[in-house]
Amino acid sequence: MKILVTGGCGFIGSHTVVELLEAGYEVVVIDDFSNSRRSVLDAIQEITGKVPFFYEGDVKKKELLRKIFREHSIDAVIHFAGYKAVGESVQQPLKYYENNLESTVHLCEVMSEFSCKKLVFSSSATVYGSPKSLPIREDFPLSTTNPYGTTKLMIENILRDLVVSDSHWSIALLRYFNPIGCHASGLIGEDPKGIPNNLMPYILKVAMGELPHLNVFGNDYDTKDGTGVRDYIHVADLARGHLKAIEYVMNTEGIDAYNLGTGKGYSVLDLVKTFEKVNHVSIPYEIRARRPGDIAICYADPSYAKEKLGWCAEKDLETMCLDAYRYVAKQAHKEEKVE
């Protein structure tokens, strides 16, 4: 079976490609390296002993997508490609609407042309907005607090309309909570370009001495220590969820949403303290004003994914922190050897 993975060199995409290859799938990757690196392809080969088919380019380009579908008999698609920084989306909303919506619409149009109607979509817990109660279930009201989240919710609605128009589609909407950690080999991990937008890569740059301190945005939330609480999930667990979703959509029709989280909430300072403890490093931090679009608390009820997909998260917060640091330490060691 051959799976097309858009954005397959990114953080979650690369880990999912590894899981797919190790499970025996053939994989085709498209990525434009706007927030990923070409070296990831070598790392994937080193981990799996296999090489995915690769196309460099933009998912908005329909002719490139048609070329991929002509050259490969694609059975299903996992769609990661898209801009993903909450803060940047607030500052540049049109950039997010144009890229994330257009790429998805063009992808679905080409999939239809080639009668490939099995799709796993990379959605987000941001579609729940500021939840009225916790833990968050899939049937909660949907709303958003930032343009990034709004693009995810708009795409979910587009895909629901698509299934209404053509019942042969089978689509899984995977609502991620907060993926961190890295592959146990230390060969692939989260390595955003420029100043990180997410918490763990920022912590890692402080740990490696690349940044002087961590900025903690808000200590006046209604939480145990005033900092925001999130459901952190190991990226390897998240990647496994995509395999379960592919298996499910290949044998069903219709559309449904699934929370991929652990069901546990940890504050920013919980994460910092756990990271310091397991890796024996100090992470100095400074408190800053809240960021626009952020909410106080967000954690999942993942029971529906367990019931329908047979999936649940397995790795704990300490493992997430250990694996994340292992990756950056290994990369730093490689760079020292090159010099």
Image (cartoon, helix red, strand yellow):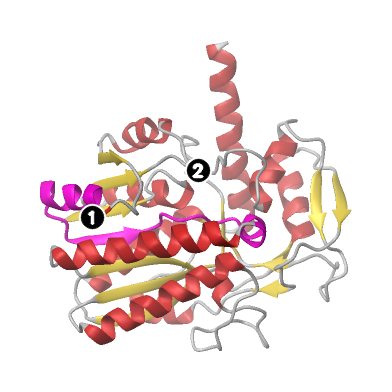
Magenta includes 235? no
How packed mark 1 is, by other alpha carbons closer than 10 Å (few <14, some 14-19, many 20 or more), is many
Q: Is residue 318 visible?
A: yes
User: Counting other residues with Cα less than 10 Å from the Cα at mark 2, is it few (<14), some (14-19), or many (20 or more)?
Assistant: some
Secondary element under disc 2, as helix, strand or loop, is loop
Give me the residue at 72% from left, 55% from top: 271
Residue 232 image-quadrant placement: bottom right
Task: Look at the image and tell me in which quarter the C terminus lies.
Answer: top right
Residue 121 location (% of width, % of height) = 37, 66
Instruction: For the N terminus, give its image quadrant.
Output: bottom left
Front residue (pair 303, 246): 246
Mark 1 = which residue? 3
Identify the residue shown where x is 19% and y is 75%: 251
In this picture, which residue range is highlighted in magenta? 63-91
Q: Position of residue 137 (x, y in %)?
A: 53, 84
Residue located at (70% from left, 40% from top)? 279
Closest to the observer, 188 or 89: 89
| Observer-nearest of 70 and 309 | 70
Provide the residue designation for mark 2: 35
Query: Is residue 309 found left or right of 88 in the rendered image?
Result: left
- Give the residue displayed 56% in from the left and 29% down from the top: 330
Q: Above or below — where is 87 with respect to 44?
A: below
**Percent x, y of residue 336:** 59, 16
Q: Magenta includes 83?
A: yes
Image coords of residue 73 (percent x, y): 11, 54
Q: Amino acid at mark 1?
A: Ile
Q: Is residue 308 above or below residue 270?
A: below
Tag 1's secondary structure? strand
Nearest to N terminus: mark 2 or mark 1: 1
